[in-house]
Amino acid sequence: MGRLLLTVVVPAALICISCAQPEAIPRQQAGVSAPADRPRLDRAPASSAPQIVFLGDSLTAGYGLPKESSVPSLIQEWLKNGGYPHEAVNAGVSGDTSAGGLSRLDWSLAGEVKILVIELGANDGLRGLPVAGLKQNLTEIITRAQARGIDVILTGMEAPPNFGAAYTSEFRTVYRQLAKEHDVTFVPFYLEGVAGIPNLNIADGIHPNAEGSRIVAKTIWAALEPLLITQSADRKNRAR
């Protein structure tokens, strides 16, 4: 069974997912950036240090924030303070869908990757893409990572209500099904405690500000740290 980290209560006014009709969603509000606006990935050359890769879209990339306020950068700070040797790799690309994340998976997993944090699907939902495609893409990402012996953390996302209750429910269920089927650590909602709260988001009402990003990082850290502890114990046992 997937390891459930918290119970999610989705705000009624979910600002991170627009309630406007799809054609009325501005490109940046939909999390879709023009190619020229897509940031370079924060991918360091392969090293011998164990790595934690954050595969995601603008929510991972840290859209609208200084680099040090992105979730992966905050996690890196806590890794250092906790004495963990891991490197946090920000593989977030603004506007990416689950298909986009899958297309760059092999490159993103170059190096000594020990943990993969998957934050994908927001743009699938905003565009009303088929849920079957989302499930297929996430399944491929999870299984390919696990085949390499990489621990996976899957974070859930919500679809906008303008595509109908059935789509929203099916979209939400995909993440729970995958977490259970593949026995991965599961965070039901990436933006728990941040979505729908104006003072925790930047002016677009979609992406967390520095304070909101820190709350998201704490949510991810709560799922991540137990894996770090387990991996550290395993390394010590093998060294005996």
Image: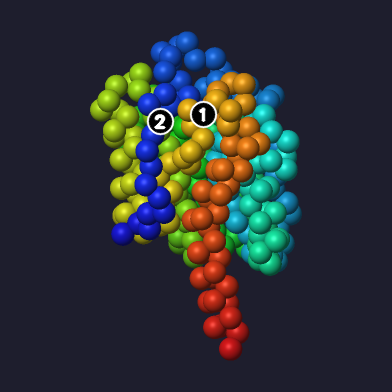
Measured as percent of width and height from the top left, residue 238 is found at: 56, 83
Query: Looking at the image, can residue 74 be seen?
Result: yes
Task: Report the residue that reaches farthest toward the left.
Answer: 166
Q: Residue at x 67, y 54 (%)?
A: 76
Query: Which disc number belongs to residue 58?
Result: none
Query: Mark 2 — residue?
Result: 11
Q: Quadrant of the C terminus?
A: bottom right
Q: Residue at x 45, y 61 (%)?
A: 147
Query: Mark 1 — residue?
Result: 197
Q: Quadrant of residue 3?
A: bottom left
Position of 78 relative to 49 (above/below): above
Task: Report the residue that reaches farthest toward the bottom.
Answer: 240
Query: Looking at the image, can residue 116 be seen?
Result: no
Q: Residues within 10 Å of mark 2 (few under 14, many from 20)?
A: few
| Mark 2 and mark 1 residues within 8 Å of each other at the beta carbon | yes
Position of 89 relative to 167 (above/below): below
Q: Nearer the viewer, residue 43 or 126?
A: 126
Measured as percent of width and height from the top left, residue 178 is found at: 35, 49
